[in-house]
């Protein structure tokens, strides 16, 4: 697994004009929560999904701080094991506590991380998440996996079925040239093809960016979706790993 990831990363890094693979999120393919059991829907009290999240312990879900703006423990639910938005299967949990990174103001200022404590345990295998020292995972060209139920085109409609795609990590200098001072290197990491075409989009926020099967980022923001020259921006989870661990243990 690590060998394959490193080989893929090397191949992409050696190809500066890498273009999106012809995959039919934006781009990507349908998948299931059986394949990715730690991917959670975050819904309102009536069951409408508006963000994603990642189960990192039976009662702990990592999501984006911006997903929790205006929310309370009574306004949100977490749904696991439900591949389709219109399904009734899986497990629904109420939320007992919402921790939002106290430094959070706006996604483009960074600090976009929150941890939900569930009222009931999810019977699904949690995902491992990065340790603070695993910053090497963000090497330019590394293959990362994105997942969500968000819109499949900019200004498009959401996907009923969970989708996934892979995107290469973009260098910090490359992301800075796209986004200028909105790119906060300590708190963010970018991923996408130079030519666009594959990206997270509205409704994918809070969901996972996985590198080698490890939660390494949180879908946060971007200029439009899948536009050439504007990669997706993800929370750089190594920076917040200790804060997450404090919540997971609380
Ligand atoms: N902010 C969006 C959300 O709340 C996610 C946007 C991601 N955009 C992108 N181009 N990758 O769902």
Image: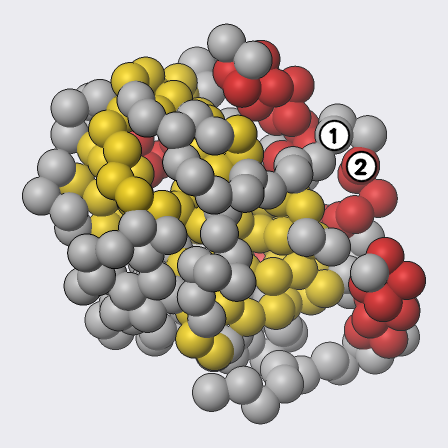
Res. 244 visible in picture: yes
Q: Is residue 156 left or right of residue 37?
A: left
- Please determine whether, in this image, residue 123 is positioned above or below residue 231: above
Element at label 2: helix
Q: Which residue is mark 1?
A: 131
The foreground one among 109 and 250 is 250
Residue occupying image coordinates x 26% and y 69%: 160
Residue with the most extreme front position: 123
Q: Position of residue 60 (x, y in %)?
A: 46, 27
Q: Which residue is mark 2?
A: 134
Toward which corner of the image does residue 141 lie, by quadrant? bottom right
Q: Position of residue 200 (x, y in %)?
A: 45, 62
Element at label 1: loop
Toward which corner of the image does residue 241 lie, by quadrant? top right
Residue occupying image coordinates x 15% and y 24%: 74
Q: Is residue 18 left or right of residue 78?
A: right
The foreground one among 247 and 25 is 247
Q: Position of residue 57 (x, y in %)?
A: 53, 29
User: Are the residues flagged by discs 2 and 1 in contact, CB closer than 8 Å?
Assistant: yes
């Amino acid at each position: 697994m690590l060998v394959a990831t490193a080989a893929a990363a090397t191949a992409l890094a050696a190809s500066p004009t890498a273009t999106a693979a012809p995959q039919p999120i934006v781009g990507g393919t349908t998948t299931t929560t059986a394949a990715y059991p730690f991917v959670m829907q975050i819904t309102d009290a009536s069951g409408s999904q508006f963000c994603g999240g990642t189960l990192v312990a039976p009662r702990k879900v990592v999501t984006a701080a911006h997903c929790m703006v205006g929310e309370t423990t009574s306004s949100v639910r977490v749904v696991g094991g439900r591949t389709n938005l219109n399904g009734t299967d899986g497990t629904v949990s109420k939320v007992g506590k919402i921790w939002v990174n106290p430094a959070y103001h706006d996604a483009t200022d960074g600090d976009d991380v929150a941890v939900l404590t569930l009222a009931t345990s999810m019977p699904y295998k949690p995902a491992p998440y990065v340790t603070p020292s695993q910053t090497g995972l963000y090497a330019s060209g590394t293959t990362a996996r994105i997942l969500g139920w968000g819109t499949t085109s900019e200004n498009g409609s959401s996907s009923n079925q969970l989708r996934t795609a892979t995107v290469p990590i973009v260098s910090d200098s490359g992301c800075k040239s796209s986004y200028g001072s909105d790119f906060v290197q300590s708190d963010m990491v970018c991923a996408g093809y130079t030519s666009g075409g594959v990206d997270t989009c509205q409704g994918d926020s809070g969901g996972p960016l996985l590198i080698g099967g490890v939660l390494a980022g949180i879908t946060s923001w971007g200029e439009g979706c899948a536009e050439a020259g504007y990669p997706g921006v993800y929370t750089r989870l190594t920076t917040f790993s200790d804060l997450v661990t404090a919540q997971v243990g609380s």
